[in-house]
Image (spheres, rainbow, N blue to C red):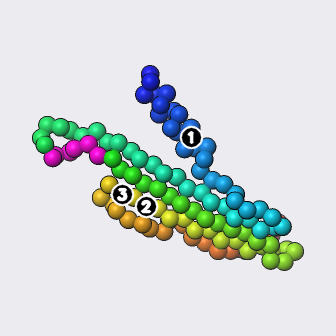
């Protein structure tokens, strides 16, 4: 029971603090988002060095912004990156990037 409560508490904290608008004034905004995750995998300990337990770490960081260019169009952009360690993917890679224009009721480009 204690392990279940601890896992629920960790999930609740991670889910509640994943994005924030750090600047918002006069039609211009800047947002940051991300997460940090660590997973423990229990291995098979029949033989030393074979299928040992491991901890895999990963994180994600994103930054985005939007600014009003004219009365009817706003410019926007976003970028997000993934990192990982300990799971045979040691990398830092782009996950999502875009720039565009928001035409209000006429849609996004």
The question of residue 50 being in magenta is answered with: yes
Residue to which mark 2 is pinned: 83
SS assignment for the magenta stretch, majority: loop
Q: Which numbered disc flags the more N-terminal residue, 1 or 3?
A: 1
Label 1: element kind: helix
Rendered-image quadrant of the C terminus: bottom right
The crowd level at tag 2 (other Cα within 10 Å; few <14, some 14-19, many 20+) is some
Q: Which residue is mark 1?
A: 13
Instruction: Examine the rendering and report whether any part of residue 35 can be seen.
Output: yes
Could you say which disc has been placed on residue 85 in the image?
3
Distance, label 1 to label 3, CA atoms, is 22 Å
| Residue 45 image position (x, y, % from top left) | 18, 37
Describe the element under mark 2 as helix, strand or loop. strand
* Camera-nearest residue between 91 and 103: 91
Give neighbour class at mark 1: few <14, some 14-19, many 20+ (Cα, 10 Å): few
Along the line of sight, the residue nearer the viewer: 13 or 80: 13
Image quarter where the N terminus lies is: top left
- Position of residue 51 in the picture relative to residue 58 (left or right): left
**Residue 107 in sight in this render:** no
In this rendering, position of residue 23 left or right of residue 42 = right
Q: Residue furthest top?
A: 1
Few, some or many residues within 10 Å of mark 3 (<14, 14–19, 20+): some
Q: Which residues are magenta?
A: 49-54
Q: Earlier in the sequence, mark 1 or mark 2?
A: 1
* Callouts 2 and 3 close, C-beta under 8 Å: yes
Task: Spot the residue most to the front.
Answer: 22
Q: Return the x and y of residue 18 as percentages of the image width and height.
A: 59, 50
Q: For marks 1 and 2, give the CA distance.
A: 20 Å
Q: Residue at x 15, y 46 (%)?
A: 49
Q: Does residue 94 sit above or below 8 in this rendering?
A: below
Asked which secondary structure carries label 3, the reply is strand
């Amino acid at each position: 029971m204690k392990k279940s409560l601890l896992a629920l508490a960790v999930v609740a904290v991670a889910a509640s603090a994943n994005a924030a608008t750090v600047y918002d004034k006069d039609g211009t905004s800047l947002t940051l988002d991300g997460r940090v995750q660590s997973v423990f995998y229990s291995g098979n300990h029949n033989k030393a060095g074979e299928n040992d337990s491991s901890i895999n770490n990963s994180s994600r960081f994103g930054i985005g912004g939007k600014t009003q260019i004219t009365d009817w169009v706003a410019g926007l952009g976003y970028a997000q990156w993934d990192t990982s360690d300990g799971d045979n993917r040691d990398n830092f890679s782009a996950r999502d990037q875009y720039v565009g224009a928001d035409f209000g009721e006429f849609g996004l480009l």
